[in-house]
Amino acid sequence: MSTAHLLHAASDVKPIERAVVDEVLDDFGPETYLGFAFYRPDGGCNLWHGWTDGGDALGDQVDSLALAAGLDCGDWLHIGDRHSSITHRGRIRIEAYPLRPILADVQAGERCPEERRSGLRRVIDCAAEQTGQTPAPGLPRWAGFGPALLNRKGNR
């Protein structure tokens, strides 16, 4: 095989990204949700979700409780930020969310501070104004930590 073949970029990077996701998942403890952003040379990115042992079921449980309690995307951002860690491996951004403390916050009724909630509302209103849309009242719903909600069509 010539060197030119060895340097030829694959047109489908999904198998490579999947292998990286599987390898990184091994570096984290159980019941963890990981969000991956693979930054592309064209400025875009490919997003992946991954869960360590027990994380998928616990993530779905967290989401069910959060939705039943009426938590929204402001609460999702706030609670997630309280527990997440972000690392980089080259052009890959990895956000790790241990789900047990997130579950505890949801069960305890932790909510987004009003100042942050108001800021999110201003961003949504500004984006709606710039695009000629009418924003819905309130904030969008809880985004999710489990596969049932994150893999739902329209959430990807």
Image (cartoon, rainbow, N blue to C red):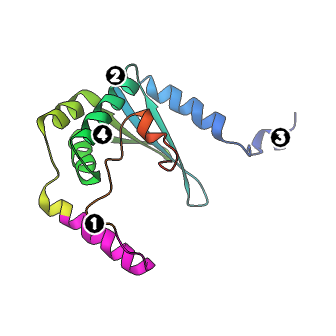
Per the rendering, the mark at residue 5 is 3
> What amino acid type is highlighted by mark number 3?
His
Closer to viewer: mark 4 or mark 3? 4
Percent from the top left, x then y, of residue 33? 37, 33
Per the rendering, the mark at residue 29 is 2
Percent from the top left, x then y, of residue 62? 28, 33
The alpha-carbon separation of the residues under discs 2 and 4 comes to 13 Å
Q: Secondary structure at mark 4?
A: strand
Residue 154, relative to residue 136: is it above or below? Answer: above
**Residue where numbered disc 4 is placed:** 85
Per the rendering, the mark at residue 137 is 1
> What amino acid type is highlighted by mark number 4?
Ser
Q: Nearer the viewer, residue 54 or 65?
A: 65
Looking at the image, is mark 1 or mark 4 earlier in the sequence? 4
Q: Secondary structure at mark 3?
A: helix
The alpha-carbon separation of the residues under discs 1 and 3 comes to 55 Å
Looking at the image, is mark 4 or mark 3 earlier in the sequence? 3
Are the two marked residues, 1 and 3, in contact with CB atoms closer than 8 angstroms?
no
Task: Rate crowding at label 4 as few (under 14), some (14 to 19) or many (20 or more) other CA atoms within 10 Å.
Answer: few
Q: Which residues are magenta?
A: 118-135
Looking at the image, is mark 2 or mark 3 earlier in the sequence? 3
The alpha-carbon separation of the residues under discs 1 and 4 comes to 31 Å
The single residue placed furthest to the right in the displayed view is 1
Residue 115 falls left or right of residue 87? left
The alpha-carbon separation of the residues under discs 2 and 3 comes to 38 Å
